[in-house]
Image (tube, rainbow, N blue to C red):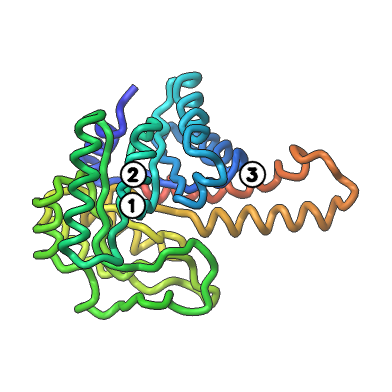
Amino acid sequence: MKTLRECLKQAEEKKVAIGHFNISNLEGLWAIFYAAKELSLPVIIGVSEGERDFVGVRQAVALVKSLREEFAYPIFLNADHTYSFERVKEAIDAGFDAVIFDGSKLDLEENIKITKQCVDYARGVNPEIIVEGELGYIGTSSKLLDAIPEGVKLGLEDLTKPDEAKRFVAETGVDLLAPAVGNIHGMLKSGADPALNIARVGEIREATGVSLVLHGGSGNNEADFRDAITAGVSIVHINTELRVAYRDALRLTLQESPDEVAPYKILKPAVVAMQQVVEKKLKLFSGL
């Protein structure tokens, strides 16, 4: 069975992307696993700080590891959007396969300093751990939005700059970079999210020499995904769309079966709804 690092290398070579999907509960984990296994594709489970506070840091590791070992399947766990070295260390010590230090709100110097600290610690514990840095602010919450998140600017001058990205990667040693290229966290209620700047994706990939991660993938159109992957994106994050599918399916079940009290019966349609979202995204990201 391939490691995450090997799966990433293969994705780069094939010009495809690995799907990264966040969970808050066991239903989400099963939905993602069922979808990936059906398509025989590697997959990454993400848990943000809030999500792993709810699921449990070591519990998330145990759940994903149990699936990987029982089914000999390339399913991996990532500590998504982590805002301090202490919490990155917590995830590394717990056995996560990958971690993200999100210093996008910090100035460049401070972001480089803490990201490098995270990289150095991960390398000392296990060189196989994938470390990702983030450069460029795209918001913080995976939710339905009335407008572009406060503080997010989408002008060309506001996107991640290739020269800064090159310096960031060189001085930190990160394996992956999450840039701001027109993407936003969350999903606009009014319709499709803003278009991605594909040219900037390519420029950053060329300047840095590392694979890129597209955060805030919920709401982007299929053409943007395909073009971004061709230009250098190797991982795509989806969260809000899964949350919406879960909520809508659960709401419908409660309306149609108000007397049902067995949680596994109430929640099964939500698992199916999330699985359908994941399958569609995985096919798109892998060119199936």
- Seen from the viewer's position, the closer of residues 209 and 85 is 85
Quick one: label 1 or label 3, which is nearer the N terminus? 1
Looking at the rendered structure, which numbered label has been put on residue 272? 3
Looking at the rendered structure, which numbered label has been put on residue 84? 1
- Seen from the viewer's position, the closer of residues 211 and 13 is 211
Q: Is residue 84 left or right of residue 245?
A: left
Looking at the rendered structure, which numbered label has been put on residue 247? none
Q: CA distance from mark 2 to mark 3?
A: 32 Å
Task: Give the residue type at disc 2.
Answer: Val
Q: Is residue 244 visible?
A: yes
The quarter of the image holding the N terminus is top left
Res. 256 image quadrant: bottom right
- In the rendered image, the residue lying farthest to the right is 259
Looking at the rendered structure, which numbered label has been put on residue 88? 2
Identify the secondary structure beneath mark 1.
loop
Quick one: label 2 or label 3, which is nearer the N terminus? 2
Identify the secondary structure beneath mark 2.
helix
Pointer 2 local density, CA inside 10 Å: few below 14, some 14–19, many at least 20: many
Q: Is residue 223 left or right of residue 239?
A: left
Task: Give the residue type at disc 3.
Answer: Val
Q: Is residue 218 above or below residue 65?
A: below
Pointer 1 local density, CA inside 10 Å: few below 14, some 14–19, many at least 20: some
